[in-house]
Image: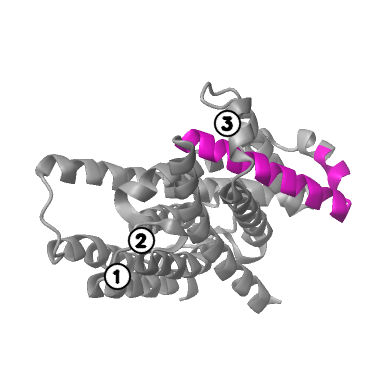
Amino acid sequence: MYMIYIALAIGAGLILAAQNAVNAQLSFLLKSPLVACFMAYIVGSFLLLILTVILGDFSKIELIFSAPIWMTTGGLFGLVFITSCIILFPKIGSVETVMFPTLGQILSGMFFETFGWFNTTVVMVSVTRIIGIIILLAGTYIAVVLSARHSTIELASSEHSKSQMLNRLWAFGAGILCTVQSTFNGQLGHYIQSPTVSALWAFIIGLIVLAFLKNNNWRHLRIGIRLSQSWFAGLAGAAFVTLMSLLILPLGPGLTVSISTLGVMIGAMLIQQFGLFQSKQQSISIYQIIGVIGMLIGILIIKIY
């Protein structure tokens, strides 16, 4: 059973990498990241509602209102995370849109486990975990900084470099919010004994917020609902949130994020290398490969030893 959980976590990562690329494409087609997010949430909510009814869990929605308030807010953090990835994907590329949120997820997951925040199992800090963090940061440095220095692309202006640094910090913060979302949704799913209802609630919360934004209206709905990208993005988002809600308790927030990272990184590198989902094609450099391998080694040290 444990190996099945690991396989599902890797699959969740692959789904997230594909979702980031498709959401960016949808944002381009609809000329707005918020409208793209709105469409993904509409489709995702619809699909999760059908799944919940099929599984016979729909009645468990009423249990949500007796849960602690903090457990019910995961959808808000997930909304910011998804919107951030849509905006950042064309700015910093598919690999970096994965790397920096991953850093945020891993480090925040460690803090959650170290202090037992939000009912997570306490895991004490050790020398090996600190070594793992150092290797993780070194891998990121190689993949981002050294890769940029040895790139054949003309060096950017200092103003552009500052902008890129802010985008990367933004991506790092988005990763922290992703961990918060997964932890909250996982705890809610355990409380009501249904990860699908927990995922549905997260989508409903995000959909309510998006529905009140002025850019989202019925005209966009008519246009977006006809696009295959809307359905793929909604399906991918629903699958990712449901899987993370399911895995967060048996594997823990840190290990769930770490294993899913393997799938995300592989997916992101394939997308960048081959220009999948109509994204910008760009060859993966040897520094990015070494850096990603270093990050994965750091993650394994942190979570296994």
Secondary element under disc 1, as helix, strand or loop, is loop
User: In the visual, does 299 lie left or right of 82?
Assistant: left
Instruction: Check residue 284 in the rendering and tell me which mark sits there, or answer none.
Output: 1
User: Relative to 108, is 257 above or below?
Assistant: below
Q: Are marks 2 and 1 in contact (CB under 8 Å)?
A: yes
* Residue visible at 56% across and 27% down in the picture: 216
Q: Are marks 2 and 3 in contact (CB under 8 Å)?
A: no
Residue 266: which quarter of the image?
bottom left
Name the foreground residue: 3 vs 38.
38
Q: Name the residue that disc number 3 marks.
A: 220
Q: Kindly state the secondary structure of the residue where label 3 is placed.
A: helix
Q: Quadrant of the rendered structure where residue 253 is?
A: bottom right
In the figure, 262 relative to 228: above or below? below
In terms of secondary structure, what is the magenta stretch mainly?
A: helix
- SS for dot 2: helix
Residue 59 part of the magenta segment: yes
Distance from disc 2 to disc 1, alpha carbons, whole Å, reads: 9 Å
Question: What residue lies at 44% left-to-right and 74% top-to-bottom?
Answer: 300
Q: Nearer the viewer, mark 3 or mark 1?
A: 3
Q: Position of residue 261 (x, y in %)?
A: 47, 65
- Ranked by sequence position, the earlier of labels 3 and 1 is 3
The tag on residue 95 is: 2
As shown in the figure, which amino acid type bears the numbered disc 3? His
- Magenta highlight range: 33-61
Circle 1: residue type: Ile
Residue 304 seen from this side: yes
- Residue 299 placement (x, y as % from top left): 42, 69
Q: How far apart are the alpha carbons under marks 3 and 1? A: 36 Å
